[in-house]
Amino acid sequence: MYFFSQLVLALITALFLPFTSLSQTPPWQKNWDNGIAYYEFSKNYERAVEEFSSVIDISPKLWEAYFRRGLAYARLNFFLEANTDFKKAVALNPVLPKTLRAEMDKYRKQETLVNVVEAIFYTSANKYDEALAALQKSSEFKDLPEALLYLCRGLVNTQSRRNIVEGCKDCEAAANLGYGEIIDPVWKQYCTQGQSNSFSKKVVSRQFLPRLKNDSGVVEIAGVVSGGAYSLVELEQYRNGVLQKKQAQTLTFTKKKGIPEAQYSLKTSIKSEFAQYGFRVFLRAKQSTANIQDTLILKADSIVCGDVILCSGQSNMMGGNVPSSPNADFMRTFMYDIAGNSWKLSIETNSSGVQNGRVGALAGELQKRLVEEFKRPLCVINGALGGTTIEEHLDFPRRLNQSMLQRTQRAKLLEYASAIFWYQGESNTSASNYGENFEALLREWKERLPNLRKVYVAQIRSANCTPGTEYFTLREMQRRFQDKHPNVVSFATNAIPLYDGCHFQDSGYYALANQAVKLYARDFHASPDTLNIASPTIRKAYFSPKDSTELVLEFAPATTTFSAPIAYKQDSVQFALHQAFTADVIDNVSGSLQRNKSIFTNIKVEGNIVKLRLPRAMNLKSISYGNDTFYPASYLVFQGPWLQNTRGVGAFSFYRFPLSSP
């Protein structure tokens, strides 16, 4: 009861006490303001935790920062972390709880969970009439998570002793939905008749288990039973709702501090397949023990096993919607969730019909295609955030990469993520240090992800998201990452349709994913489909030995077959493919260098060779390929023509590639 009182007091303190503004501008003010904005307005509690953590890093004795971070933790369902922060806040400011009750009514219309928290508060204070009244009000909120209703109703009915049987059923349901540690002391006191169980290892509903080398995942159930009234623990394993097998372990009790205790450990496995597994764990009562019945201590359903992919970057990696799929049950993700269960279907929506797994169209289509093709569940954890620079993924105060890795660790998948897809760069207003920062990300990934094999990097399109960006230089860096790092695979976004100058429509993201999935299938499943799946990249540029007005470009892979170029015509805009190529020209008289000159008059393609025609013999230093966001002298977003292979895969843009000998 003491733990409950402290936790509830802390929760209510955080939810209802306003923050007193400070008159000075301390060094952590920006982080504080960001944290308040994330919590109050965007409801991004994960980011709020990060911002308030930054405040604590700067000023570790600021009670308000612990208090606010605790609030954010509570909304993410991390009640133990919240309790720790709230205790720290009260330790730094002992008068804090005294102002609690006077502030509660001010927030009644702003917090949909206010009545639920009141119900917990009144229950902890043994005021059960008030608790039941508050709980009745909470049912008016349609968006109230089911797990919280089970939690509050279970606490009220057990501790008031008005309906212990139904209260214990609700407590059990709440525990299975993620509130086990909060329910545990009440369960032991009212529902076990002096008997208790404590898990050290278990699974939860919708959990995604990593696939091991034998194409299966391990399920471990372990814990301690106290009281001595049970003879064995029994595990039932179901596959698609059908009982598959049972296993049991005899309980051997020894006294510890005068209380009989028995440890148990059960292990089983599930296949990585199109099947959902369920588990039931029972404590079987001794026949000689009166008034003690068999007890169900764990119920977990919809558990699958498969591979793990991480995604990160900015809005083009997280924008749009996950496509519908008949295999949606096997497309999973992991999120911080107030409802008590952080595992979600990638396509899952909230009550307003908005997808809330943060997977997005590109990663979602990638996930869908891989699940369909290889008949294996797949978990995608997406750490992308719109409008962010590469520095924000690395550095204080945001540390978005750390946030993604922390989420993966909480999902117990950190050691099993084998690939990362990275799509970012539009928000970097300068290419300065981009290469060094990407290498820093690579180092973090290699250090934290021991099973990481491949990093797939999208070469961005020229964009109007952030004017002034050095896109040509940055794209050249992204093209060359795969040449410098053996585990990096770059891929172009050129030739992908439905681009608005910053983002794609969902169908555009799906088209890009359909190209990227072939690269993954080649690298991880030894797919034989390898011809013309990689983005063609320039390898050599030289003048034809027989014709000084013909520039020859060789592309890799050598098996590339380019499709014949078709000029673009729409309204007053006409654009031919050779116009997308420019050159740095050295003046034969003055020796001066003229940058990015559009000088070519025609283009021909032969296999992996591109031949560009010059109006006359000229002295060229380098050549570039890649469009700007708009057509010349137009506000029409560039839609082609593209240099692409016969399967529609666009060639990389390249910038100031030097000429050499044949």
Image (tube, helix red, strand yellow):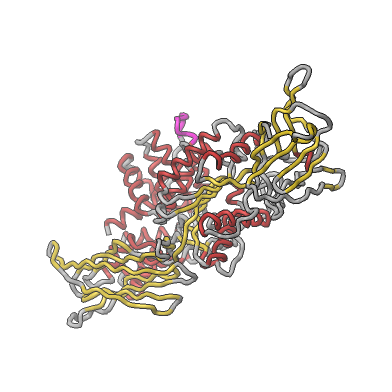
Quadrant showing the C terminus: top right
Q: Could one spot residue 628 in this view of the protein?
A: no
Whether residue 47 is situated above or below residue 196 in the rendered picture: above
Q: Which residues are magenta?
A: 22-30
Residue 487: % across, % down: 50, 46
Quadrant showing the N terminus: bottom left
Residue 128: % across, % down: 35, 65
Which of the pair 380/32 is nearer the observer?
380
Q: Is residue 23 within the magenta segment?
A: yes
Residue 73: % across, % down: 41, 50
Residue depicted at x 50% and y 55%: 309
Which residue is situated farthest in the bottom direction here? 287
Which residue is situated farthest in the top direction here? 590
Residue 112 is left or right of residue 497, and the answer is: left
Residue 321 is left or right of residue 552, and the answer is: left
Dominant SS type (magenta): loop
Residue depicted at x 81% and y 47%: 568
Residue 416: % across, % down: 42, 55
Residue 455 is left or right of residue 287, and the answer is: right
Which of the pair 264/573 is nearer the observer?
573
Whether residue 398 is situated above or below residue 4 in the rendered picture: above
Which of the pair 578/156 is nearer the observer?
578
Which residue is situated farthest in the front direction here? 546
Q: Could one spot residue 472 in this view of the protein?
A: yes
